[in-house]
Each structure stands twice: as C-alpha cells, then as structure tokens.
Amino acid sequence: MNKSLRFLSFLSVVFITLLFINAVNKADVDPKTNTHKNYKVKALSLPKNLNLAGERVPLEIADVRERMDRELLVNTYWQSNGLLLIKRTNKYFPILEPLLKKYGLPDDFKYLALAESGFTDETSTVGAAGMWHFMKATGKEYGLEINSNVDERYNIELATKVAAQYLKKSKDRFGSWTLAAAAYNAGNYGVSRRLKSQKVDNYYDAKLADETERYVFRILALKEIISNSEKYGFVFKKEDLYKTQKTYTIKVDSAIANITDFARGYGMNYKEFKIYNPWLRENKLNNKSRKIYEIQIPIK
C-alpha cells in the first residue's frame, strides 16, 4: 500500500472512531440538562454536631448555616484541591499532632495550619511564611530567628510552639478557641475592637472582615471533609497518600561552610537536605553565636 492510501485509510479509521465516540456521547447526554447522565451536583446536608475544639457551631442561626454551607460546598466540589490536601494530611498530621499535644493546643488546630498554608512552603502575597504562615514581625516578636540565612518560620516544631503561644494567649483574652482562631487571621486587636464596638462576645454574632468571616468556617469545612472523606466522594487507596519520612536529629553548634558538602556527608544531595530542613535558606549556616541548631536527617 502506498503512502497516500495508508494516509487515507488512517483518516477513515479516525473519522469512524470520532463518529462512534460522538454517538456514544450523545447517548449518554440527558436532553433535559444537556449534561452527561451521570453528572450530578448535589446539595450537601450539614452535619448536626459541628464543633471547633469542642465549641459548638450554632447552625440554627440562618446566617451561620449559610456561611457553613458555602465553605462545605466550595471545599467539597473543588475536588482536585481537596484530594491533594487529603494526601498531604497523611504526611504532615503525624508530625503535627504530637506537637499540638506537647504545646497544649487542641487537635483541631491542625486544620487551621492546613487552612493557612495547605502544608506547602510557599510564602503568601503579604509575606506570611511557613506551615503556620507567620508574618516576619510576629515571628520575631515570639522569638523566632528570621533573616536571610535562617528562617525558623519554616521549622515545624519551633513554629508550632509559637503558634500555640499565640493561640493560647488569644484564648485567655477572648475566652474561646473559636475567637482565638479568628484572631489568628485578623489579629487580637482587630477582633477585640470589633467585638467592643458591636457589643458582642462571640465569633458567630460578630460582623468581621470578609476574610475572617469565612476563616473559621473554612477550618470547620476542612475538618469535616477530611474526617469523612468517603462521605464527600473522595476515593483513594492508602498507597495514593503521601507518606511521612522518618528522620533522626543531629545537633550543630558551629557554622556550616557549604551545605551541599555537609549533606553529601550524610548521603543526601542539596535538594534532599532542604526538603527536611527548609528553615536553612542559603547554602551555608553562618552561626557566629554558636547557637545549637537541630538538623533533620532522613532514615533511608
């Protein structure tokens, strides 16, 4: 068969295949909705006993119910992001949960960290960084070292310790974990000013900035969806989830002239080293003060 005939034969096969696919697709389309017959977007039933750190969500209030419904819908039907977050929680929750317990925060605050950063090391548009998304000024105020060489906002344990201090201080001030969570987003002063001017004393009665009005409900939605992922249509196998890499700790009280060479001494390349120690921001550790730093080394 010459080239022209082979090409015509190929086009014929493609044409017939497309006709078949089109016919199948038409057969699967519901003429009333003009969508695939299996395509359904369902309203969600709100759980009856939603709570944040044991504090009940008053869903009998129409405004509260609508705001909760909004975040549950948005986070359920943004399927790709939801599945990605579920995969990441399997990696980071085992690290975060014992730290929350150690520093006296309710377990539910792991969902606040997730809402803040999505468990990525990306810096926000306003400069918040690390799992807990601290601003530079706040991190320094609470004792984190933050400079071009070392940024402890990226150190999960140290940042969790500071987050616990901040949130417990807010809890003491406002009397509730829910308002403490809101203050994590809007600041203690901002929340206090709004409560005082409106003469209310809880999150669900206060009129706050739009972002803060959604903030606690997003945390609640993530908690509900991730705790009951199958209920919300997320299908995966255990092997699909990201895994926590076990590490051991070494202590360093001197400078490291070249992190690439240092990492190679422990069987790693530079990239691997930075994955487990993102708080080291350059290819060296200055450490003129002889401070003791803890470095994580993966167990292979």
Image: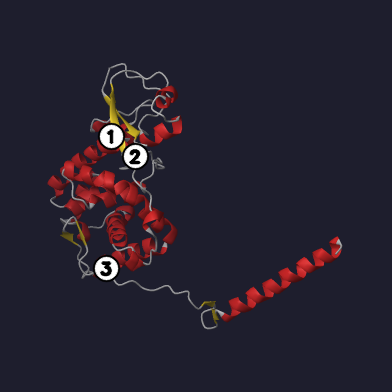
Q: Which residue is mark 3?
A: 65
Dot 3 crowding, Cα within 10 Å, few <14, some 14–19, many 20+:
some
Name the amino acid type tagged 2: Gly
Task: Kindly give the residue lying farthest to the bottom in the view shown.
Answer: 32
- Distance Cα–Cα, label 2 vs label 1: 10 Å
Evaluate if marks 3 and 2 touch, with contact meaning CB atoms under 8 Å apart: no
- Distance Cα–Cα, label 3 vs label 2: 32 Å
The residue at the point 22 percent across, 53 percent down is 108
The residue at the point 63 percent across, 78 percent down is 23
Q: Which residue is mark 1?
A: 139
Dot 2 crowding, Cα within 10 Å, few <14, some 14–19, many 20+:
many
Task: Kindly give the residue lying farthest to the top in the view shown.
Answer: 288
Front position in the image: 243 or 300: 300
Screen quadrant of the C terminus: top left
Screen quadrant of the N terminus: bottom right
- Distance Cα–Cα, label 1 vs label 3: 35 Å
Front position in the image: 192 or 50: 50
Front position in the image: 249 or 205: 249
Residue 139 percent coordinates (x, y): 28, 34
Q: Give the side of residue 174 with respect to residue 289, left or right.
A: left
Q: Earlier in the sequence, mark 3 or mark 2?
A: 3
Evaluate if marks 2 and 1 touch, with contact meaning CB atoms under 8 Å apart: yes
Element at label 2 = loop
Element at label 3 = helix
Residue 70 percent coordinates (x, y): 34, 65
Residue 168 percent coordinates (x, y): 16, 44
Pair 3/2: label in front = 2
Element at label 1 = helix
Q: Which residue is mark 2?
A: 130
Can residue 197 be seen in this snapshot? no
Give the label on residue 169, or none: none
Name the amino acid type tagged 1: Gly
